[in-house]
Amino acid sequence: LKKVLAKLYVPCGIPANLQMHIIMGFVIAIVIGLIAHSAVVGLVVGALAGVAKEVYDHFYEPGDPFNKDALLYTVCGSIVGSVIVFIV
């Protein structure tokens, strides 16, 4: 999955890692939102996935503390995905 996401990298001033957070939040919100027929559910699940990832990194990845920026970018991706689900 990282190889696929690395090909989506756009040199725009946002680091590749944070671009992956945007993409994953977006994808999670779209998929879950469409399955649940609810943009809100997609948004919540996308945001919770971001929180879970950062909590996991904090406790299980040495030297990788809780990253608020990564969480913010994941939530932003989730918001955009949820808006698309709401429109569709």
Image: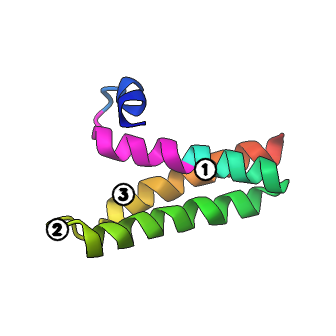
Magenta stretch prevailing secondary structure: helix
Residue 66 visible in the picture:
no
Residue 61 x %, y %: 23, 65
The type of residue carrying mark 1 is Ile
**Relative to 58, 73 lies left or right:** right
Residue 76 visible in the picture:
yes
Residue closer to the observer: 7 or 14:
7
Residue closer to the observer: 27 or 12:
27
Disc ID at residue 45: none
Q: Quadrant of the C terminus?
A: top right
Question: Which residue appears at 31% of the width and 44% of the height?
Answer: 17
Closer to the N terminus: mark 2 or mark 1?
A: 1
Q: Is 6 drawn above or below residue 34 in the view shown?
A: above
Residue 18 x %, y %: 35, 47
Disc ID at residue 28: 1
Magenta stretch in the rendered image = 13-25
The residue wearing badge 3 is 70
> How far apart are the two marked residues, 2 and 1, measured between alpha carbons?
26 Å
Mark 1: which secondary structure? helix
> How far apart are the two marked residues, 3 and 2, measured between alpha carbons?
17 Å
Mark 2: which secondary structure? loop
Which-is-in-front pick, marks 3 and 1?
1
**Relative to 25, 18 lies left or right:** left
Residue 12 x %, y %: 33, 30
Q: Quadrant of the N terminus?
A: top left
Closer to the N terminus: mark 3 or mark 2?
A: 2
The type of residue carrying mark 2 is Pro
Quarter occupied by residue 46 = bottom right
Please report contact status of discs 2 and 1: CB closer than 8 Å, yes or no. Answer: no
The residue wearing badge 2 is 62
